[in-house]
Amino acid sequence: MTGTNDVYGVGEREAAGSALIEAYERGHNLGDWRPIHERMRIASCRLCGCLLWIVRPPDKKTWRAGGNALNAD
């Protein structure tokens, strides 16, 4: 994440890092993470435009990753 500091929690960083590695292993080159909501961040592949996001559902403490960058090879 660009400008990662104490604003971001450990769980958010772990989810973003794991998702970034998985997307990279599938051939994606992700750009900067952009906040969409206080509980959602999104990044897109610089090569093909596939999306990757991390979300923290309401009333949950853990972040989850998703997006077509994790499904497409």
Image (cartoon, rainbow, N blue to C red):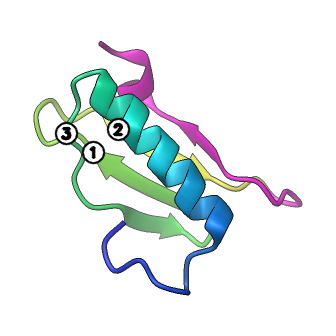
Amino acid type shown at disc 2: Leu
First reached walking from the N terminus: tag 2 or tag 1: 1
Side (left or right) of 59 relative to 72: right
Q: Which residue is mark 1?
A: 44
Residue 63 magenta-highlighted:
yes
Q: Position of residue 20 (x, y in %)?
A: 39, 43
- Contact, mark 3 vs mark 2 (Cβ under 8 Å): no
Dividing the image into 4 quarters, which one contains the C terminus? top left
- Element at badge 3? loop
Residue appearing at x 23%, y 31% in the figure: 28
Residue appearing at x 60%, y 62% in the figure: 12
Amino acid type shown at disc 3: Asn
Q: Position of residue 55 (x, y in %)?
A: 62, 52
Q: CA distance from mark 3 to mark 1?
A: 8 Å
Side (left or right) of 16 relative to 34: right
Dividing the image into 4 quarters, which one contains the N terminus? bottom left
- Element at badge 1? strand
Q: Which residue is mark 2?
A: 51
Looking at this view, name the residue that lies furthest to the right.
Answer: 59
Q: Is residue 60 visible?
A: yes
Residue appearing at x 55%, y 85% in the figure: 7
First reached walking from the N terminus: tag 3 or tag 2: 3
Q: Give, as a single range, the part of the protein colored magenta.
A: 58-73
Relative to 61, residue 66 above or below: above
Q: Which mark is residue 29?
A: 3
The quadrant where residue 22 appears:
top left
Q: Which tag is nearer the camera, tag 3 or tag 1?
A: 3
Amino acid type shown at disc 1: Ser
- Contact, mark 2 vs mark 1 (Cβ under 8 Å): yes
Q: CA distance from mark 2 to mark 1?
A: 4 Å
Label 3 Cα neighbours within 10 Å, binned few <14 / some 14-19 / many ≥20: some
